């Protein structure tokens, strides 16, 4: 037989220990050795716990950052989606605008004389606009389809009445107009010299001017404190509304050698076109036998040879709309007073400035973004991140009907 290696028990027996005591001692030794080899030290436990805490913190920060990015992304997508629908609706209304020189428009204008009395409708802060358009509207009740005309009076504004539930929200008026003579109480389309919402300036009145002058058909449009009839909130997130005009490039109608490039303006006609012909002496007839006096040179009035009125929007290629939008979750962090400071409804110059002559494409949008970053209105950072600004060119469609 081969060599036999004695076990711990056998060795203890050979050394004179009782077998039971030797076996118990051996088992205790083996168990103690196993326990010593499987345990962690206090330092190892501390390191392990620290690494675990660090991993949990990193993972928590990662989840928080992902949640923040997701929320901001959803806010931006919601704002973009609703703003796109709003601007698309405005684009349709402007594209279907009635462009006739014998109807009135309610438009912003910073024109100054000459001629005396030229239309000047400055609109500091939020702007308003009103015009006829071949789109559906809210027709008066009762009325039938045969009484309802194809035109509507369309108007846009941001409500500036602090007592209104629509305060600091974009409203649209869509007043469906009946055919002429349908009803003595339903106002149809009115033609010059009846004004749409504000008195017609002198250069736009026919000669001789009617006496008394006609009153506006819908004065509520020009009244800041009035509630609009046949209107709705179309942009609940829009608190700033500004627009200006892209004027066409064209040739001077008097001096064919002079060509004007397209420009931006806050006046809805091209003030550069004002080339009155040189006065031609004309004899003044007198009764015979009195001698005929020398001819007298009579100058052509500027209202006849200059562009001094919209005249069917003949000089306008597009209306450029700029709006500021705040998403609902961010709006709860902003007071109406802070929004009024941004859009000028508090009576002071707005933080989001008005269009100024000479601005280049995109400059107004850039100034609004810079003003929001400067945060002079004292908004919390979370609210500022929820405000977005947009710009859209709303092109007009031909033709334009110029009446005598």
Image (tube, rainbow, N blue to C red):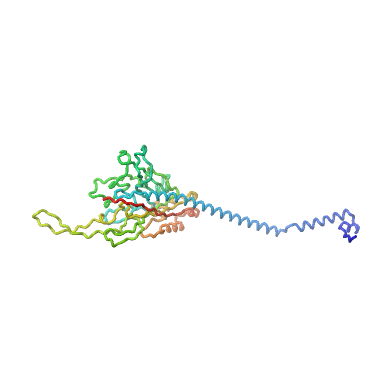
Which residue appears at 46% of the width and 58% of the height?
373
Residue 13 appears in view: yes
Nearer to the camera, 301 or 198: 301
The answer to whether residue 227 is above or below residue 359 is: above
Where in the figure is residue 315, as x and y percent of width and height?
A: 32, 55
**Could you tell me how many numbered marks the image carries?**
0
The answer to whether residue 273 is above or below residue 186 is: below
Nearer to the camera, 128 or 164: 128
Residue 227 appears in view: no
Where in the figure is residue 171, as x and y percent of width and height?
A: 40, 47
Where in the figure is residue 170, as x and y percent of width and height?
A: 41, 48
Q: Residue furthest bottom?
A: 257
Q: Residue furthest top?
A: 142
Where in the figure is residue 332, as x and y percent of width and height?
A: 49, 49
Q: Is residue 165 left or right of residue 73?
A: left
Q: Residue furthest left?
A: 289
Q: Is residue 328 left or right of residue 13?
A: left
Quarter containing the N terminus: bottom right
Nearer to the camera, 337 or 144: 144
The answer to whether residue 293 is above or below residue 130 is: below
């Amino acid at each position: 037989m081969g060599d036999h290696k004695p076990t711990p028990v056998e060795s203890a027996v050979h050394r004179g220990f009782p077998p039971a005591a030797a076996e118990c001692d051996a088992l205790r030794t083996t168990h103690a050795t196993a326990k010593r080899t499987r345990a962690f030290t206090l330092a190892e436990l501390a390191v392990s716990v620290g690494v675990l805490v660090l991993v949990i913190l990193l993972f928590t920060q990662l989840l928080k950052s992902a949640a923040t990015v997701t929320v901001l992304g959803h806010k931006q997508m919601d704002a973009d989606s609703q703003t796109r629908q709003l601007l698309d609706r405005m684009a349709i209304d402007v594209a279907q605008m009635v462009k006739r020189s014998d109807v009135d428009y309610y438009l912003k204008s910073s024109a100054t004389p000459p001629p005396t009395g030229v239309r000047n409708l400055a609109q500091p802060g939020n702007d308003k606009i009103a015009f006829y358009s071949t789109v559906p509207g809210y027709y008066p009740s009762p009325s039938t389809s045969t009484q309802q005309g194809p035109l509507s009076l369309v108007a846009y504004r941001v409500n500036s009445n602090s007592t209104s539930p629509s305060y600091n929200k974009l409203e649209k008026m869509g007043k469906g107009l009946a055919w002429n003579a349908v009803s003595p109480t339903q106002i149809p389309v009115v033609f010059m010299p009846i004004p749409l919402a504000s008195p017609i300036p002198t250069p736009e009145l026919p000669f001789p001017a009617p006496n008394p002058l006609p009153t506006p058909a819908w004065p509520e449009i020009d009244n800041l404190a009035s509630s609009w009839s046949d209107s709705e909130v179309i942009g609940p997130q829009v608190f700033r509304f500004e627009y200006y005009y892209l004027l066409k490039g064209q040739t001077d109608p008097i001096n064919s050698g002079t060509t004007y490039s397209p420009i931006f303006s806050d006046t809805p006609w091209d003030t550069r076109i004002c080339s009155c012909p040189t006065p031609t002496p004309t004899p003044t007839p007198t009764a015979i036998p009195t001698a005929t006096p020398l001819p007298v040179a009579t100058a052509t009035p500027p209202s006849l040879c200059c562009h001094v009125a919209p005249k069917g929007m003949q000089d306008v290629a597009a209306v450029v709309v700029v709006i500021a939008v705040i998403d609902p979750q961010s709006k709860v962090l902003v007071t109406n007073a802070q929004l009024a400071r941004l859009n000028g409804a508090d009576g002071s110059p707005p933080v989001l400035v008005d269009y100024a002559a000479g601005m280049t494409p995109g400059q107004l949008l850039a100034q609004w973004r810079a003003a929001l970053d400067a945060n002079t209105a004292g908004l919390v950072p979370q609210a500022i991140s929820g405000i977005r600004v947009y710009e859209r060119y709303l092109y007009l469609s031909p033709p334009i009907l110029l009446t005598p």
